[in-house]
Amino acid sequence: MLQELFSLSGQVALVTGASRGFGLEIAKLFVEAGATVVLNGRYRDTLEEAAKSVGGKVDIAAFDVADTRVSTAAVAEIERKHGKLDILVNNAGTNIRKPLAEVTLQDWQTVIDTNLTGAFALARAAVLGMAERRHGRIINVGSVLSILGRANIAAYTASKHGIAGFTKSFAAELGASGVTCNAIAPGYFETELNRPLLDDPAFVAFVNQRTPLRRWGKPHELAGAALFLASPAGSYVNGHVLAVDGGLTTTV
Ligand SMILES: NC(=O)c1ccc[n+]([C@@H]2O[C@H](COP(=O)([O-])OP(=O)(O)OC[C@H]3O[C@@H](n4cnc5c(N)ncnc54)[C@H](OP(=O)(O)O)[C@@H]3O)[C@@H](O)[C@H]2O)c1
């Protein structure tokens, strides 16, 4: 019973941004739970290395999520090759940290195209088949910046608020088709994305002090939330933004 509750046996999942960080940890756990997992990132060689580290039933699909024409075609190719796509984890993301006066419109566009438009386009492409099959799970990786604001990252904050917004809208529209759509809002984790923050002792201490658990998260600590939302255990959870942040957003 317990095993069935968290089983992804027979499921096909696409995890974007799976060459490292959260995406790689989620892919490893999904494979362990019985899924066939397609790893996405921009570079074939890094994906091949990541696939080796995952082992089991994995495939790779190298594309830039910001290129919506290519990403939409990739969903069709996965459905052709694997027969279906049950789970999409929109995890690929980027950030450009700059004071407002230095942010260019190109910086804004790059972050919005990758984090928001890329996720939307993939989700829209994936839900068509899911709705036909009357089963599917969309899991969008937002951030505590889906809820809060911070200086120097306006585009990132806008993109992550947008993730929370379209998650709720998709949930409302697709529930009747048997497709759920949820988001995860991670706090501060030790990944490459946060390298500049981790190299700043004052910021490391600020996060430790601000977070009720008094520490940064480890990448593997996010994967369980994704498995919950993808598996039968999460079957009645829809339109939720699940904070995995050590309690950060519960305090001011
Ligand atoms: N770490 C945190 O504390 C934290 C907190 C809140 C939210 N998040 C969110 O969690 C997600 C994963 O972050 P992470 O911390 O694991 O970051 P990470 O270690 O930097 O990994 C980012 C992943 O995204 C891929 N990627 C970046 N741009 C891409 C693009 N245009 N197309 C396809 N793949 C792309 C990267 O692969 P390649 O470079 O090989 O293409 C890599 O696999 C992001 O959405 C991030 O905003 C992270």
Image (cartoon, rainbow, N blue to C red):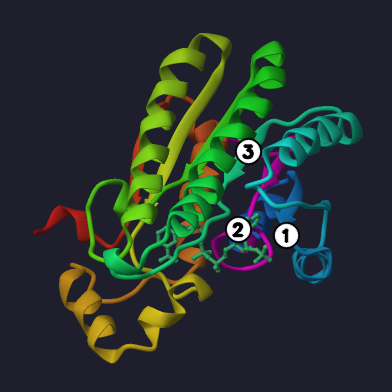
The answer to whether residue 76 is above or below residue 26 is above
Q: Is disc 3 surrounded by few (<14), some (14 to 19) or many (20+) residues within 10 Å?
A: many
Mark 3 / mark 2, whichever is N-terminal: 2
| 227 left or right of 155 in image | right
Between disc 2 and disc 1, the foreground one is 1
Q: Quadrant of ligand 1?
A: bottom right
The answer to whether the residue bearing label 1 lies less than 8 angstroms from the nearest atom of ligand 1 is yes
The answer to whether the residue bearing label 2 lies less than 8 angstroms from the nearest atom of ligand 1 is yes
The answer to whether residue 234 is above or below residue 114 is above
x, y percentage for residue 166?
42, 30
Q: What kind of residue is marked 1?
A: Arg
Q: Secondary structure at mark 1?
A: loop
As drawn, the residue found furthest toward the top would be 176
**Residue 148: mark:** none
Mark 2 / mark 1, whichever is N-terminal: 2
Q: Which residue lies at the image location 73% right of the left edge and 33% below the top edge?
A: 72
Q: Secondary structure at mark 2?
A: helix
Q: Which residue lies at the image location 29% right of the left edge and 76% below the top edge?
A: 215
Residue 29 magenta: no
Residue 18 magenta: yes
**Residue 88: mark:** 3
Q: Which residue lies at the image location 41% right of the left edge and 48% below the top edge?
A: 142
Range covered by the magenta-colored residues: 3-24
* Disc 1 target residue: 42
Tell me the quarter of the picture where residue 126 sits.
Answer: top right
x, y percentage for residue 143?
37, 53
* Disc 2 target residue: 23
> Looking at the image, do the residues carrying marks 1 and 3 touch, with CB atoms under 8 Å apart?
no
As drawn, the residue found furthest toward the left would be 252
